[in-house]
Each structure stands twice: as C-alpha cells, then as structure tokens.
Amino acid sequence: MPTIAVTRTIPEVGLRLLGAAGEVRLWPDERPPTPSELAEFIHGCDGVLTMITDAITPELLDREPQLRVVSNFAVGYDNINVAAATARGVAVCNTPGVLTEATADAAFALLMAMARRIPEGIEYVKAGEWRYWLPMLLLGQDINGATIGIIGFGRIGQAVARRARGFGMRILYHSRTRRPEAERELGATFASLDELLREANFVTLHLPATPESRHLIGAREFGLMRRDAILINTARGAVVDTDAVVAALREGQIGGAALDVTDPEPLPAGHPLPDLPNAIVVPHTATSTVAVRNKMSEMASRNIVAVLRGEAPAAIVNPEVLAGR
C-alpha cells in the first residue's frame, strides 16, 4: 500500500479517505515541522498532504524519487516549487472553489468591523466605560454608497464584488486580466492600480502570492490612498509590506487595516502591528468554517487518492505530469 504523509491534523473526512487508500502518517503536533523535520517526516512517502507553511523545495523532491503527488490544503501553492515538481513528474494539487464564499464573507466581515469600529466598541464595554449614549461616540465610516477597490478579480474578488453590490457600493477593480462579463454582471469598473488606490474608501486584496505581487502595497501605494481608506487583506501576507503598513497606520496616512494574513506569519511576539488602535489582525481564519474545512479536507485527500490510482484529480496545478503516465 502507498504511504501518505499529512503534515497537520485535518478533518476526519479526509483522513478516512486517505486511510482507505494507503497507510497514513500524521504529523502529531500543532507546530508546523521545520524543514529538516519535514524532510524526515515525508521520507519514503508516495503522497503528501501539505499546508502553506510547508516548503516543498527541489532539494526535498530530489530526496524522494518515489513521491508522486503533493496536495496543498489551500488554494494557493506558493510554498511548492511547481516547476521542480513538474520536472520530476510530481503532481501538485490544491483546493480551489470550495473556500471562495467563506473567504469573501471574511473579507467583508473585516471591512465592516473596521469601518464601524466593532473591536473598539467591544473593548469599550469590557472596560466598563459605557455609561451614557453619546452622539459622538465611536463614529465610523459609511459602507453603503462607498467605493470599494478590489485588487485581484478572480473567484474570490468577484464574490466580494457581489457582496459590495448588495451594499450599493461603487465597485472598482484591478487585475492582470480585464473581465468584461464580470463587469457587466457586477457593475464593476476596471481601473489602474493607482486610480483605484486614490479613489477607494476600502481596498481589499484577492490575488495570489507571486514574485510580481510581493509588496505590491508598500510605502508608495499608501501615499496614494485616501487618509480615511481602510485596507483589507485575506490573500497572502507578503502582498503587503509590513513595515510600510505599520508606518502608514502610525502616521495617519490611511484610516485603518484589517488583516487576516501577515508577513511574517505569525507575527513575532511584541510586533507593533496588532497593538495599533487602527488595526485588526486575526490569525489567518478566512476559511475557518466547519463546512469549508471539511470540503478542503475531502478535496485535498481525493486529489491524492486519484493520482495514486492513476486517475485525474479534481484540482491539479500541473496537469502535464499526468500525460506521461
């Protein structure tokens, strides 16, 4: 039977599928394996179910010539060297589609929480400061009728646009590819990055981590944004320059930032970002619903089972590797 490594505990539905197809080797700790631990843990395995914190490098792949499939428990796969995997005939799989709506929900939840100063209100009540109703207490920003700028207009970006449309928002978007059908369906307008940054009350990021997108939002971009603008990031932490966002928040260049992801992730103890009054930082939980995590578990596991059986998986990043089998 094939041996399948799983680098973190996942919902039972996935473990059952893998257990029926082979011997499962489950990483026993909440802490992710170090590179050396990962190399030892997956040694001799035919398939690996990975998290975005697990770096699958050419060197690692060279030590495992029997490896046939790496299935990421995520849509993104920037932790995997896909070119190296393809050159070695290793299928790379992911979990697109199943987490679109949950991520869009989370992005909009962060937008609303920051705009209406919900965390500040919670702390205000907990601190026993709520003694009167006051006309000027915790004044926030309107969402209805505001302009939202969506950077990255794939599945998740368009799902956010659908939510924004329900709030009567003006929708600007920027992406590498114009999407005329989505523009017509959602009432969205394509804009250059700089135009979007200048005009949007809310800027929300929905693009993959690539060399081109690294620090796409940095000091120059914060300088273009409105002083009351709010940045939302549920994509990848590296899309935003962390030092630049701290400076922009401290100096009042922008109104706030609501971040599900950071760079580095997690932030080191004592990092100033979570303690800034105009920041919300949550621990990468945009897809954290019971239904979505079950679907991710099932899809990531079915991908592995399919490849090991010589079948086409539901979601493969490099389908060309299957042609030679």
Image (cartoon, helix red, strand yellow):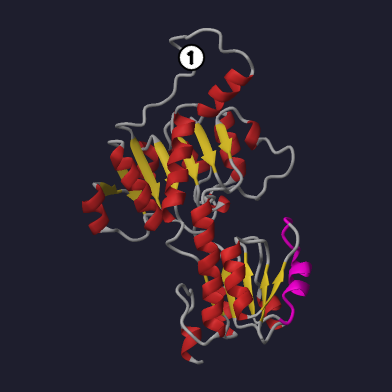
Q: Is residue 104 visible?
A: yes
Left or right placement of residue 44 versus residue 52 in this view: right
| Residue at 50 percent of width and 52 percent of height | 235
**Residue in front for this viewpoint, 222 or 94:** 94
- Which quadrant of the rendered structure holds the N terminus? bottom right
Relative vertical location of residue 118 with respect to residue 281 in this rendering, above or below: above
Q: Residue at x 69, y 82 (%)?
A: 62
Residue sitting at 37 percent across and 38 percent down?
200
Instruction: Return the residue nearer the eye: 97 or 140.
Output: 97
Q: Position of residue 46 (x, y in %)?
A: 65, 82
- Label 1: state its secondary structure: loop
Q: Residue furthest left?
A: 184
Identify whether 221 is placed above or below 78.
above
- Please tell me whether residue 94 is drawn above or below residue 139 in the rendered image: below
Q: Is residue 251 magenta?
A: no
Q: Is 35 a magenta residue?
A: yes
Q: In this image, 55 relative to 29: left or right?
A: left
Q: Is residue 32 left or right of residue 123?
A: right
Q: Amino acid at mark 1?
A: Leu
Classify mark 1: residues with Cα within 10 Å, few (<14), some (14-19) or many (20+): few
The residue that label 1 is drawn on is 137
Q: Residue at x 45, y 12 (%)?
A: 136
Q: Which residues are magenta?
A: 30-44
State which quadrant residue 51 falls in: bottom right
